[in-house]
Image (cartoon, rainbow, N blue to C red):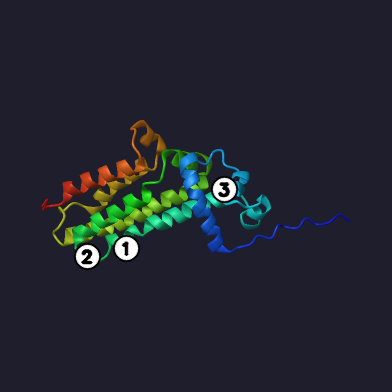
């Protein structure tokens, strides 16, 4: 009888895996995802290829973890936007500042490769956009109820944000307009907010 193939037992160690993936993220942002291999991973982390495979089953797992780490970081804009201890308008600009700092390293080449090479992982980006839109709608509703924003249907306000965020996550749109994700983000939200605030002081 032939020997049964044994599945390679992988080590979990989530903290170690996260640490390594964080080391890889700048490389992905600079060079994209199209040409990176597990050999590249082992060289960048200064590990043997066998060690890499003990922790990660594929390149896709590494990319998925990298995207999850980035989205988790960005998601904390909610803490600043919904911080009821801070003045309402300050919360908006505090969250904008936070977001700007945490999306500034996202490159068009990374977005393009992620969208075209890893469509299943890309779905998590779309899910995050929906999460962000729900938070924005809650924020707008609060501002309207307090008389700080124009009395506009929050759903309509979020609709325009949805169109923008979908365009923002489209690398072809950014490239064709010669924009980085950071530039587009700052210009849109500052323009929009100053257009809906009653007191412009």
- x and y, in percent, of residue 29 in the image: 46, 44
- x and y, in percent, of residue 163 in the image: 32, 43
The residue that label 3 is drawn on is 44
The residue that label 1 is drawn on is 79
The residue that label 2 is drawn on is 86
Query: Tag 1 or tag 2, which sits nearer the N-term?
Result: 1
Q: How far apart are the alpha carbons under marks 3 and 2?
A: 42 Å
For this orientation, the residue located farthest to the front is 46
Local SS, label 2: loop
Q: Quadrant of the N terminus?
A: bottom right
Describe residue 163's horizontal placement relative to residue 142 as left or right.
Answer: right
Badge 1: residue crowd in 10 Å (few <14, some 14–19, many ≥20): few
Residue 65 visible at all: no
Image point (32%, 63%), residue name: 79
Query: Tag 2 or tag 3, which sits nearer the N-term?
Result: 3
Image point (47%, 48%), residue name: 123
Checking the image for residue 192, the label placed there is none
The vertical placement of 51 against 115, above or below, is below
Which quarter of the figure has residue 37?
top right
Q: Nearer the viewer, residue 98 or 164?
A: 98
């Amino acid at each position: 009888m032939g020997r049964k193939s044994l599945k390679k037992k992988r080590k979990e160690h989530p903290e170690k895996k996260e640490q390594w993936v964080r080391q890889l993220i700048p490389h992905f942002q600079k060079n994209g995802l199209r040409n990176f291999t597990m050999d590249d991973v082992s060289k960048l982390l200064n590990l043997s290829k066998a060690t890499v495979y003990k922790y990660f089953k594929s390149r896709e797992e590494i990319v998925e973890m990298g995207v999850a780490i980035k989205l988790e970081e960005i998601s904390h804009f909610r803490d600043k936007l919904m911080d009821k201890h801070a003045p309402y308008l300050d919360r908006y600009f505090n969250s904008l500042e936070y977001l700007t700092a945490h999306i500034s390293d996202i490159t068009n080449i990374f977005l393009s490769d992620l969208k075209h090479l890893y469509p299943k992982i890309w779905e998590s980006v779309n899910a995050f956009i929906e999460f962000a839109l729900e938070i924005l709608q809650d924020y707008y509703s609060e501002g309207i109820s307090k008389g700080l924003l124009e009395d506009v249907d929050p759903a309509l306000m979020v609709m325009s944000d949805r169109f923008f965020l979908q365009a923002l996550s489209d690398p072809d749109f950014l490239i064709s307009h010669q924009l980085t994700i950071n530039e587009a983000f700052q210009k849109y939200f500052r323009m929009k907010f100053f257009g809906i605030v009653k007191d412009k002081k």
